[in-house]
Image (cartoon, grey):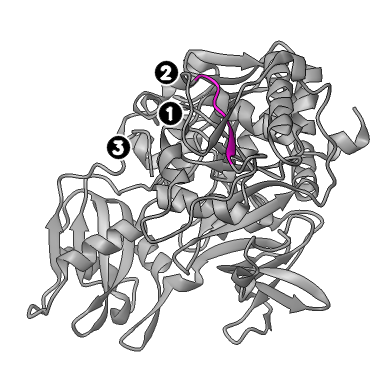
Amino acid sequence: MDAAVGEALHGRFLRGVDLAPRNDAVRVGADSVTYEQAHERALVWAGALLRAVRKPPSTVAVLAAKGVDAYVGILAALYAGATVVPLQPGFPPARTRRMMRAAQVSAVIADEAGWAQLPELMAPGPDGEEPLDTGGPDGVLPVLAPGCGPGTHPGVDRIVPEAAGALSEPRPVRPADAAYVLFTSGSTGRPKGVPISHGSASHYFRLQDERYDFTPQDVFSQTFDLNFDCAMFDLFCAWGAGATALWAPPGAYRAMPTFLAESRTTVWFSTPSAIPLVRRLGGLAPGALSGLRWSFFAGEALTCQDATAWQTAAPHSTLENLYGPTELTITIAAHRWEPERSPGIAVNGVVPIGRVNDGHDHLLLDEGGQPALNEGELCVTGPQMTCGYLDPADNEGRFLEHDERTWYRTGDRVRRIGEDGELAYLGRLDSQVQIAGWRVELPEIDHALRGCEGVTEAVTVDVAGASGTELAVFYTGSAVPAATFARQLRAVLPQGMTPRHYWRLDELPLNSNRKTDRGVLRSRAEARLGGSRTHSAPDATTETTSTSSKPSTPTT
């Protein structure tokens, strides 16, 4: 393989073609595509994209749910030399329109759901937003919609791929070119576009190749939506090894041991919230997940309790806690779980995030923005760092100039542990709140709550009350009287850190990426505590209905 192609993100797929051309590259239910088939199809689609636009497509949106077409669409856009923007058809059209406009999308690859949404996306927004700019020669948007019925939409140029127009090979790209753009939720209330370059991805996946022993015989779970950066780990680690990426359907969580055994899954990757979900559904019996070789968790704090439960069910699996914001290319640190060591160095019962990736520097900032020795906000610089957001206005406050270099401010508080460079995650800067003059760390309260008798999971949220900020707790497990909570917590927490409100749920709600949805919990607490309060005793009730964390396919 040409060295320049090898540095491109799609060069990893070409490695898979060489290693295992007849292996399934992707499997979604009963539908699958081999490396050879996906490669040939992507070359055809890439050629069709290039013919349909005024100039080579700089940005191609893949507006598709999980399916073979979505995965091949990502590959085709990369083959065309374009930047890929994965989008979810289930998102509100106004949000998707803003993301497409911000990324300056010049063509779209859509499945049936994406195709059905196009008329609304092409129309002016309800708030007076102008229609999308288009990349076609006649002011229309070129759209490749394989698998959709005949016909088109106003303002859309339907692309018809033809084998005769296939590219002979992927177009060349430079290391500085953006491979993909993902959108994160911004504090401004609008999504922020994060471009990740081929060079950043190349550095990242080179480190993964050195750290792990993936082979063509591996089968990777695909639990993340394609607009979530952890999905890139699944895809391009699998593709670089000639392995199979397997969509994990909703039913997988209901019968996890059976699903993993029948699909011969060897590599699992999800948010930690999957662990209590599988536990509740009876899937974490000792040895139940014995076919796994690797288990990865990222996206939120992984507790030692959950790591232990998963490791017991997957005794032959090496478990790692991965950490990293989108702006630092998927993950920037990792801790390998060691049952004899890891719990002893954990802080607040949370598995450490480990050491920052090779080739990067990091520093900690205190509350005054000055370098700190042992604890503070984590800042990172190095080849995995994005060059900045699509909108330069979003860069303010997120990047730091220090020591003649630019650093990304993660907004996460960490603590150095030991002498080998490992870090412990303490929580978001915004998870530190003031309660009656007390500086309160919400993760510390969560940890104390998990030690209370009868509690399985617990999340603390801060809520504006009639007399100032109050702490409210949602937990799963047995019903516990508020007085019992107060008595047990007083033994480990100062009085000012003891919550006043406790509500039991059957399940904690999860968002579309299967992270615990703290926003939903905060809204529930605000609704319960709305208006003036006259009571002074702690409040404890039980909710027996909760649907947000059911193992169903998320759409928003």
Expressed as whole percent of the image width and height from the top left, the position of residue 148 reads 48, 21
Name which of mark 2 and mark 3 comes first in the sequence.
2
Residue 119 lies in magenta, yes or no?
no
- Residue 339 in the image: above or below residue 442: above
- Image quarter hosting the N terminus: top right
* Quarter location, residue 390: bottom right
- Identify which residue is drawn at 68% across, 14% down: 37
Q: Quadrant of residue 412?
A: bottom right
- The residue sitting at the right extreme is 2
Task: Left or right? Give the position of 426 relative to 449.
Answer: right
| Viewport quadrant of the C terminus | top left
Crowd tier of the residue under label 1, counting other residues whose Cα lies within 10 Å: few below 14, some 14–19, many 20 or above: some
Residue named by callout 3? 550
State which tag comes first along the sequence, 2 or 1. Answer: 2
What mark, if any, has residue 96 been given in the picture?
A: none
Q: What residue is shown with label 2?
A: 258
Percent position of residue 336, x then y: 63, 46
Q: Which residues are magenta?
A: 140-147
Does the residue at mark 1 contact the one at mark 3 (Cβ under 8 Å)? no
- Quarter location, residue 486: bottom left
Residue identifier under label 1: 286
Residue 145 magenta-highlighted: yes
